Each structure stands twice: as C-alpha cells, then as structure tokens.
Amino acid sequence: MKILVTGGTGYIGSHTLVDLLENEFDVVSIDNGMNSEVSVLDAVRQITGRQLTHYAIDLCDKDKVDEIFAKENFDGVVHFAALKSVSESMSQPFLYFRNNLNSLLNTFEAAKLYGVKAFIFSSSCTVYGNVSESPVDENTPWQEAASVYGRTKQMGEKIISHCSSETTMQSIILRYFNPAGAHSSGLMGESPKNMAQNLVPVITETAIGKRPTMKVFGTDYPTRDGSCIRDFIHVCDLAAAHTLALHHLLQHKQKDKIDVFNLGMGEGVSVLEAIKAFIGVTGQNFSYEMAPRRDGDVTAIYSNYSKARQILGWQPKLTIRDIMHSAWQWEVNRTKKQ
Ligand code: WQD
C-alpha cells in the first residue's frame, strides 16, 4: 500500500513516516520546507533502512499537486501540512488561512479525484476552543476558536465533512493535544526552521543555553498553580495512531464516511509542572520568568481518548518523563551537529 504524507519533513510527519515504513507501507512525502529541513529524511532512512520518495513542492500549487496524484496512485493520504503556531497565527492571519486551507483543499480534492481510499486529517484540540472543563471527548461542543490556528482546524474539519459526499473515500480526523518529545534514536525530533514557539522546545533551548531565559505566559489562570494546563502526548505515540487509523480504513473497518478521534494522554499537566518534570528528569536547571498571558491561549484542556482506544486499539505508552528525556536528548544531539 502506498501512502502520501503531506508535511512529511515536519515534526509529526517525519515521525509518522518512520512508523509507516516500519509497518511495511510504501510512503511518499510532500513538503515545501517552509518550516522544516529536508535533511530529516536522512534520519528516517537511517532509522528504518528503507527508501522513500520526496517532492519539495507547495501544496497551494494545485497543478503540481494534481500532477503528483496522477503519477503516484496513492491508496491513502495523511495530511499534516499546515502552519501550527498558535501565537504566530494571531499575528499572521492571512498567511495561516491561505496556507492551511488552500493546501487542504488542493490535497483533499485531488485525493477524491484520483481514487484515494483513506484520508487522515491532522486536526487539533484547539478546535474545542476555551472549554470550561476537561477532559474533553469527541462530542464536546466547540467554543469559539481561541486562535486563527484553531479556526483553520475548525474550518478544515468542516471542509472535509462537506466535501466527503459523492465519494467512496473515507476519512478519519485526528485531534492531537500537545505533541512533544523525540524519537528514541536521538536522530530526529522537533526542529522547526522558525524560532520554536512550543513549550517543550523552548524549555530545551533555554536549558542548553540557546536562550538566556524563557517566559511562563500567565500565572494568574484559575488552575491549581496559576499556569495553563495541557495534555502532552509523545510524538511517537501520535505517529502510531496514524498507522492504526490507516489500517482501520484500508481494512474497511469503518462504516461511516468520516470519524473523529482525540489523541492525548488523558491527563493535564501545567506549564510549571512540565518545567519541573524536565528539571527532575534531566537535572538541567535553567532560568524562567513569570510573564503576562499570551494571546490565543486556552486556560486548560486535556483529553478523553477512550474512543481511539476502543475503536482503533490505540494506547499511548510514553509519559511526560519520556517526553522530557527524549526532547532533551534530541536538543543535545542537534546542538552538537550545529
Ligand atoms: C502550551 C502552553 C503557553 C511557550 C499546541 C500546538 C498546536 C496544537 C495545540 C496540535 C501555553 C505556554 C509556551 C513558552 C509558555 N497542537 N508556553 N512559554 O499553544 O497549547 O498549542 O497544541 O495541533 O499546534 O502549538 O502549545 O506549547 O505553544 O503552549 O508559557 O515559551 O505553554 O502559554 O499555556 P499550544 P504551546
């Protein structure tokens, strides 16, 4: 079976390439390199011992997308490609709406046209907005998206729902909570081309000295320690969920046209608790300061992932300690290479 992974040189995309290759799929990657390095594919090949095809094109170029679909004849598509910084989306709304929606529209339309059987969409817990309580399950009503990024994911899910008629293609929407951590080999991990905005890479970059200090955005939230609460899920556990979702569709186990699954650890960890977990696991202390809240942040959100466990047979195996240990190992290794 041949699978297209869009955003294949990105953080979750590259880890999913590894999982798919290790599960005997043939894979093709598309990525325009806007926020990732193509060199990550060397690590993918080294870890798996397998080859893959990569196209360095922009998914917003419809003609180029159609050309690849006509040539490659995919059985399934995993669509990761998107810009994903909550804070950056607030300062660059046109970039986020144009990039995230046009790339989805081109990819989904081509998949329908060229007979793809299974479409997996990378969505996010940000579709739930600023929920009043957690855990959230897949039926939790959506609030207003707290960020442009979250709005592009809400719109993406609606596009898939609306455009799935008149096609035999089936879709699964995966709502990630906070992806973090790195591959156990230490050969790949979160390495955005642009300045990291996510908490865990900011922690590791501060701990290794790339940043003099970091900010805790808000300690006056109505939470147990005043900082925001999130559900950190190891990127390798996330990758495994995509392989299970593809098997579920390609083995015709899904009766509905579309289904949706939360992917998280099912427990909340605060920003301050995450910092303490990092220090506890690595022994690396570092400077951090309390700062005002960040625009676009939700107070607290964590998942109920029992639907993915029951239907996909998915179970996260790695903990916040594994996340911090692997993220630190990756930061040390990538700094040595620089
Ligand atoms: C987490 C918390 C920050 C940096 C992420 C992904 C998004 C989506 C949802 C998958 C917030 C705080 C951060 C810093 C801090 N995932 N923080 N200092 O915003 O929850 O969104 O999960 O689709 O793609 O980005 O993640 O790591 O940016 O923030 O205090 O230097 O850490 O305020 O409370 P977020 P994040």
Image (cartoon, helix red, strand yellow):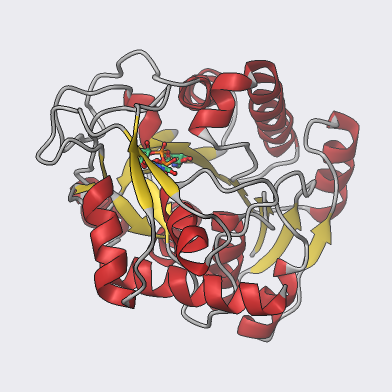
- Decide which of 260, 38 is in the foreground and name it: 38
- Decide which of 12, 328 is in the foreground and name it: 328
- Residue 28 visible from this viewpoint: yes
Quarter of the figure with residue 84: top right
Image height of 206 relative to 270, above or below: below
Q: Report x, y in % for residue 138.
A: 26, 33
**Image quarter hosting the C terminus:** bottom right
Q: Report x, y in % for residue 305.
A: 23, 48
Q: Report x, y in % for residue 139.
A: 23, 27
Image height of 218 relative to 328, above or below: above
- Decide which of 255, 40 is in the foreground and name it: 40
Q: What's the residue at 48%, 77% (across, down)?
A: 329
- Residue 247 visible from this viewpoint: no
Q: What's the residue at 58%, 30% (across, down)?
A: 88
Q: Report x, y in % for residue 40.
A: 70, 68
Q: In which quarter of the image is ligand 1?
A: top left
Q: What's the residue at 45%, 65% (across, down)?
A: 207
Q: What's the residue at 21%, 54% (across, down)?
A: 273
Image height of 97 relative to 170, above or below: above
Q: State how many labels appear.
A: 0
- Residue that extends furthest to the left in the rendered view of this protein: 224
Left or right: 113 in relation to 172 = right
